[in-house]
Structure formats: C-alpha cells, structure tokens
Amino acid sequence: MTLPLVTPLPNIAFFDSGQGGFTVWEAIRMRLPSLNTQYLGDNARYPYGNKGEQTVTRYSSEAAYFFSALGAGLIVVACGTASSVAVQSLQRVFRIPVVGIVEGFCEDAASVLRGSEKNRSEGKVALLGTRFTVSSGRFERELKTRGVGEGSVWARACPLFVPLVEEALVPGPLADAACELYLSDMPADVDVVMLACTHFPRLEASIGKFLGQKFGRPVVARRIDGDVVVHAGGEGAPLYLLESSRGIWKAVDAFLAEQTPSVRENYFQNETRVYCTDAPARFTEVARVFTSLPVGEVQEVTLGV
C-alpha cells in the first residue's frame, strides 16, 4: 500500500470503486465548501458490481485501512455495491466510524411512502442498482425494518446505465433505449424509485421522462437541496426519484455536530485530496461527468499488499 508523503488534515473520506461516488462527494461539498475531504476511486479493480462478496469486502477493507492512516474522522462508502455487503463488516473492524448509503437511503424511501397518499404497506419501491446490489437483498431487508411491506420492492439490475454515464451518453437515444430495456415492466403502483448506484443520478432526466410517459404521472427528483420536477406531464400523485446523498448528508452533519468546536474547526481548512488506483489522467476525465467541482491533481496509489 502506498501513502502520500504528507498526511492530510482531519477530514471526511469518500470511497467508491470508481468515479460515481463524486455525486455524493459533490453534494456534501456544495453544502460545506471548506470541508476537508479525501476521495479514493479504486478504478484499477472497477467495477465491483460483477465481483463476489468476499472480494468486495476485501477491497473495501483495504480502502478503509488507507484512509485510517490519513486523518479520516469519518469514512463514507459512496458505492452502492460496497455499501450492500461491506459496511457492516468495516463497522465491526475499524474504530473510525463508517457509513454507507443503505440505511439512510432506505429511511428516506420509507419516509416518502409515509408522506404519500398511500399507506406504506400499499406503496411500492423500485430499486435500481448493479447486479450485486440487487442480488444481495440488503436494501429489501433494511426497507422491511422500516415498515415497507412484504413484496413491496421491485428490484432491477441496470448494468448498461454505468457505461452510458461514463461515456457521457446521457441524456440521449441510447439512454432512452436502456430505460426501455430495464424499466418497461416496472409495476404501475411504484411510488418511489431508488437510484441505488451513484452513477444513476446522472440518468434522472432519461429515467424521469420514460417513467412519466409510461405511467402518465409527474416525476420529481428528491435531491439533497430540494425537490426538482424532471417530468411535468400527467396527472395524479408524483413518482419520486431518490438518490443517496440525502442520507449521507445527515450522517456527515451528525458526525460534525458531535465534535467540540475546536476539533470541528480543524475539519474546515478547505483541503481536498483525490486518489485513484490506476490511470489518473483518464480518471480525471471521467470524474468531470460526475462533478462540476475541481478535483485537483489526482494521485495514483496502490491498495493492499
């Protein structure tokens, strides 16, 4: 494992298998511009969505070890696949608090159903993610603990969404075709669509247009900074698209609130560091698809032995 020569200031660390986690990183930094952050994209071993549970857990553990040596006060696993399987293991092993997207995301979905015209036991949730995220069943278990009824989760793996986003082909005809491929049999009584891969928020417009036209309903994206209508046609109750940054924001805010004023001040020195595990130039190029914020010079590092 390689480490930077200079240890960063106290920071919040973000980890993903690639660049998709920048959607979460950006959402937090837009609210806290001077927050010290680190970001690590394990693009040498990307994607995680087609790998096994033990492999994903090992990769995630190596990332957590990397951050534990670099001043991280909180580790955010900004990856749907790693959050589905590895976070609970990391929480048992590391003293540094670790949060993933699952718990807060599922609470967000359940709260939308609670506020809808239907009872939670009647409304349905559509879960869109990688093959691994969908097959893990992790989101369904968390939703069940929050009162979402049995059989109320429709899950679909959407692997083509990822390369479409990375090649900046959204919105467009290929994205529209992928929505037709994956979403044409979504049940009409779905009220909440969970975008359970950090790439998928970049498909809001395409997904919103397809579902709005399919169901004849307005479609609203519920983002960290408020609701945005992405499809205005149709009648009836809106269909909500949810992304994971809202739950992460609550976790980051709670962590910072627990710090003493003097310690908290150390987290706001406007220091940002970005690392990847392969091809920094290409990594930076793809990163621009996911964030409009500058990522600075990306440093290549090695994880594991």
Image (tube, helix red, strand yellow):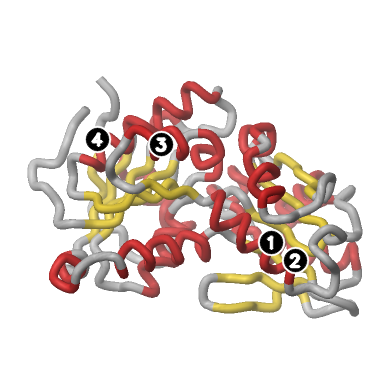
| Residue position for label 3 | 43
Q: Secondary structure at mark 1?
A: helix
Structural crowding at the residue carrying mark 1, measured as other residues with C-alpha within 10 Å and reported as few (<14), some (14–19) or many (≥20): many
| Residue position for label 1 | 110
Front residue of 36 and 113: 113
Q: Please provide percent x and percent y for residue 178.
A: 75, 48
Please name the amino acid that badge 3 sits on: Asn
Q: Is residue 270 visible?
A: no
Front residue of 70 and 253: 253
Of the two numbered discs 2 and 3 in the rendering, the one whose residue sits closer to the viewer = 2
User: How far, Cα to Cα, is label 4 from label 2?
Assistant: 43 Å
Of the two numbered discs 4 and 2 in the rendering, the one whose residue sits closer to the viewer = 2
| Residue position for label 2 | 113
Please name the amino acid that badge 2 sits on: Leu
Identify the mark nearer the N-term, 3 or 1: 3
Q: Secondary structure at mark 3?
A: helix
Image quadrant assignment for residue 261: bottom left
Q: Measuring 46% from the left and 39% from the top, which residue is drawn there?
A: 87
Front residue of 302 and 142: 142
